[in-house]
Amino acid sequence: MKLTYPACFYPDGEKKGAYAVVVPDLPGCVSGGSTLAEAILMGTDAASGWVLDELEDGKPIPEASPLENITPDAGGFVSLLVLDMDAYAEKYGQKAVRKNLTIPAWLNTFAENNHINFSQVLQDSLTALYQQKRQA
């Protein structure tokens, strides 16, 4: 899933070439960098982390405001950040979710006798299916 959010960029008055980044649609999402390129990367990372936290907590993510509806404070400008949530979640997603499952008794006996980790098998299978669907 790719998302775009408008971000406000503000030159740092104390450090030449540095920028602060604020993502108005994501409350408290603020970052910055010592160059504009770094500020864009850091803003994207901060926004991706903000959205991933919401997704992992089962909360809806805010809709992005239209670019023309965002007005920066004096001296700032607005640009879009592009978030690749699939890649970010694959790299940084940490939260585990407990799931109950039902399998035939004979399969349970087989797995236990062979010291098979149910969670790992399910996770490996779902990861392979996820990657297969992403490539399609």
Image (cartoon, helix red, strand yellow):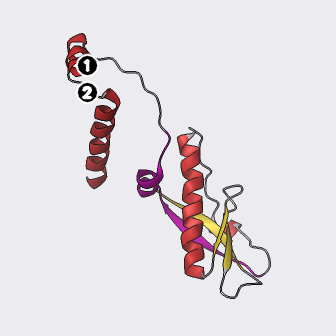
Asked if 134 appears above or below 106 in the picture, the reply is below
Is 3 situated above or below 56? Answer: below
Q: Is residue 49 left or right of residue 26?
A: left
- As drawn, the label of residue 37 is none
Q: Nearer the viewer, residue 72 or 34?
A: 34
> Residue visible at 66% across and 82% down?
18
Q: Position of residue 47 (x, y in %)?
A: 59, 60
* Mark 1 Cα shell of 10 Å, populated few (<14), some (14-19), many (≥20): few
Q: Amino acid at mark 2?
A: Ile
Q: Position of residue 93 (x, y in %)?
A: 47, 48
Q: Residue at x 73, y 78 (%)?
A: 76
- Dots 1 and 2: beta carbons under 8 Å? yes
Residue lying farthest to the bottom in this orientation: 16
- Image label count: 2
Magenta region, residue range: 75-95
The residue carrying mark 1 is: 112
> Can residue 85 be found in the magenta stretch?
yes
Q: Which residue is mark 2?
A: 116
Secondary structure at numbered mark 1: helix
Q: Residue at x 25, y 27 (%)?
A: 116
- Residue name at image x 20 percent, y 12 percent: 106
